[in-house]
Image: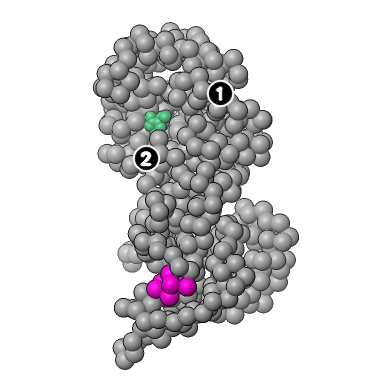
Amino acid sequence: MENHRRIIIFDTTLRDGEQSPGASMNIAEKLRIATQLEKLGIDVIEAGFPAASQGDFKAVEMIAGALESARIAALCRADHNDITKAWEAIKNAVHPRLHTFIATSDIHMEYKLKMSQEQVIDKAVEAVKYAASLTDDVEFSAEDGSRSQPDFLCRIFEAVIDAGASTVNLPDTVGYAVPDEFSNLVEYVITNTPNINKAVLSVHCHNDLGLATANTLAAIKAGAGQAEVTINGIGERAGNTSLEEVVMSLGTRPNFFHETTAIDTTRIYPTSRLVSMITGIVVQPNRAIVGANAFAHEAGIHQDGVLKNPMTYEIMKPETIGLSKNNLVLGKHSGRHALYSHISGMGYNLSDEEMNIVFEKFKHLADRKKNILDEDIEALINEEILRSAEVFRLEYLNVSCGTAVFPYASVHLKINDRLVKGAVEGNGPIDAVFNIIAKLTCTKSKLLRFSVNALTEGTDAQGEVTVRLFEDGITALGKGSDPDIITASALAYVNGLNRLEYLKENPAELSPVL
Ligand code: KIV
Ligand code: ZN
């Protein structure tokens, strides 16, 4: 693929992705995702929108200070104060990028901005000039670009490139475009923006019609040089273009696409899992590339073909995306060193202290589950290392339930260091467990969502429970996993309550509403 054009991958999981309903991440979680994105080979990581909240500012500042090779972008409106805030957050990055935007469609200019075309151009130019006085890496986005008048788009792009923008982005903000039309628009912009060769043309597509990837690929074919994407396609409303679909389409069809990326595709699957675990947004089983069924062959005729030659029915090898076919790894007799090197191979970089915690929990799990798979280890790391500070801790749980007994749960909890005990009945075992936990913790949260997912195959698989809790205007996600799904539910509930406490103590980390 030597002569292939190199496409810049701009990941906005931490900014547009965080705008997915219910997906909020704390600062430590954002830093963990950013670190993984850098290892994945992302060129530009959009870390957040610093003017949106104090928590966003801090997260962007921390990511900017921690990463080395990726460019770190901060989003800001075409507004002096926004740009100043964004710059404050990223100025210590090795490679900072300011990403400023204003809407350019008639409907947005008339109803939202109440500005004329000339006023919008002036504001955009003023913003880009100011941003360019701070850094030479400035991106300008024409919000609602796909519904903007093509000639106006070319005029504003020409003006902002003259003002110092090195990337101009054409978003399909409302997911309205279709591939042929979008590729024509990209061609039109390339042909009719006189100085376009001084900038990279980017595209940013939303998935309202399920066409985000198709539109992005059509735009790349038509000459776009940067694709804006998110892991698992998360994002505002129906989401954004998914990284895995774009990267694997380019890589799998090199005869059709003469473009390539710097992504280390073997890290796609672990990154997808990490983002799903942290955001609580489950990947649907039939999702392309990263769904649980993406490489599963059910029909006998397919299985037979795959056994004879995998390429009969597999257009990609599972190993290419980091999905090990045989990830049966460790068991009860595996030592600390084996676990350590396996975890490092999975892309995690744990300190000695973190390793000790994970090893202890691993041994405990191995006593109850014969084969420990990658998914089990990921869940352990997620629960033990990514946990926020704990006010509540589950110490003991005993449940009785079945056809002939009334569901009953007895729980011991540590609240800070104080041990409290209690028992109540419920409509079912989980209801009983949640009731007694709520009573002991004197909390009144509402359960918005409860889901159980088997982490691996087999009846001894760990159940992974996700809860979404709501209290006093704050929503928090809780996760727990255990071979016993009632214990997993109790752990998830307690985890959710701890995260609610954390958010009450740290309101700055609440997700911004843009
Ligand atoms: O969808 C959109 O238009 C955006 C811009 C801020 C780039 O997210
Ligand atoms: Zn967007």
Q: How many marks?
A: 2
Q: Which residues are magenta?
A: 433-440
Asked if disc 1 is less than 8 Å from ligand 1, the answer is: no
Q: In this rendered view, identify the residue nearer to me: 269 or 107.
A: 107
Q: In this rendered view, identify the residue nearer to me: 116 or 299.
A: 116
Q: In this rendered view, identify the residue nearer to me: 411 or 263.
A: 411
Residue 137 is covered by the magenta coloring = no
Q: Which mark is residue 411?
A: none
Q: In this rendered view, identify the residue nearer to me: 342 or 169.
A: 169
Label 2, secondary structure: give it: loop
| Residue 346 placement, left or right of 181 | right
Residue 369 rendering spot, x and y as whole percentages: 54, 77
Asked if disc 2 is less than 8 Å from ligand 2, the answer is: yes
Residue 66 rendering spot, x and y as whole percentages: 66, 40
Q: Vertically, is 472 above or below 83?
A: below
Residue 261 rendering spot, x and y as whole percentages: 53, 35
Q: Residues within 10 Å of mark 1 (few under 14, many from 20)?
A: some
Question: Which secondary structure class fits the magenta region best?
Answer: helix
Question: What residue would you read off at disc 1?
Answer: 84
Q: Amino acid at mark 1?
A: Thr
**Residue at 39% in and 57% down:** 470
Label 1, secondary structure: give it: helix
| Residue 294 placement, left or right of 483 | left
Residue 244 visible in image: no
Quadrant assignment for the C terminus: top left
Q: Amino acid at mark 2?
A: Glu
Quarter assignment of residue 178:
top left
**Residue at 69% in and 63% down:** 355
Question: What residue would you read off at disc 2?
Answer: 236
